[in-house]
Image (tube, coloured by chain):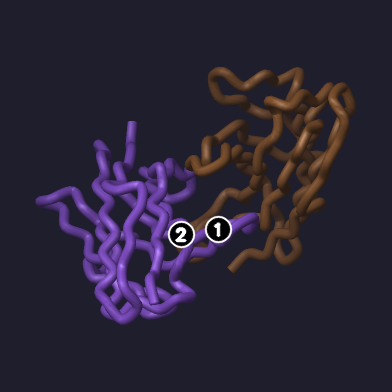
Chain colours: A purple, B brown
Amino acid sequence: AQSVTQLGSHVSVSEGALVLLRCNYSSSVPPYLFWYVQYPNQGLQLLLKYTSAATLVKGINGFEAEFKKSETSFHLTKPSAHMSDAAEYFCAVSDQGNTPLVFGKGTRLSVIA
Amino acid sequence: GAVVSQHPSRVICKSGTSVKIECRSLDFQATTMFWYRQFPKKSLMLMATSNEGSKATYEQGVEKDKFLINHASLTLSTLTVTSAHPEDSSFYICSPKGSLSSGYTFGSGTRLTVV
């Protein structure tokens, strides 16, 4: 069965600093990987997805993630944090691309002015 | 991507009453809907999978008699929390079975508070 591990339940960065949110996956088959953002009391918004094409995936709001098979990782980055990036971020995996997503525990990103 | 509308966004109910949550697919036909539950400051846990015209499949530990799921049409799936208790208070989110192109969309969620 597939799973994801998000290292760090809370990450705090200064405005303008690099954002790095870590995600490692476990899957017996080539995975489909996703990053979502959730603002308080709202649903999930897709930031980006990896579907076995390019290993460097660019998403919305300046976020990107790199799929590294050797490290079983799919870390999310953004060069310069903005106050509006403060939210909860979830990494998720699907083994077939249309089965229920399995989510990590989430990482809360705080951005300090 | 697929657009899904979830209602209500917030509901407060008394213990012992039932609450229905609706999830409508607006621009596509959702043959399958996933229902998730999110505890405060926790991740999303899959509760059940509903298929149009058939019985839902529940995950281990989820009471099917408490969480009734109906998927009577290709555009509507409902989750009814029956005889609600304070421990049922949570954030419930629906998500139609996705595809790689749509990237799995989600409803806006329902915050249920049982008092």
Question: Marks 1 and 2, Cα distance to the nearest angstrom?
Answer: 6 Å
Q: Earlier in the sequence, mark 1 or mark 2?
A: 2
Q: Residue at x 42, y 50 (%)?
A: A97
- The image position of residue A103, as x and y in percent, is 43, 44
Horizontal and vertical percent for residue A105? 40, 42
Q: Mark 1 highlights which residue?
A: A44
Please give left or right for residue A64 compared with residue B58 in the image: left
* Residue holding disc 2: A36
Q: Dots 1 and 2: beta carbons under 8 Å?
A: yes
Is residue A96 visible in the rendered image? The answer is no
Q: Is residue B64 left or right of residue B16?
A: left
Image height of B59 relative to A50, above or below? above
Q: Position of residue B10 (x, y in %)?
A: 78, 50
Front-most of residues A75 and B101: A75
- Name the quadrant of the N terminus of chain B: bottom right
Q: Is residue A99 visible?
A: yes
Q: What residue is shown at x 77% (from left), y 24% (from top)?
A: B85
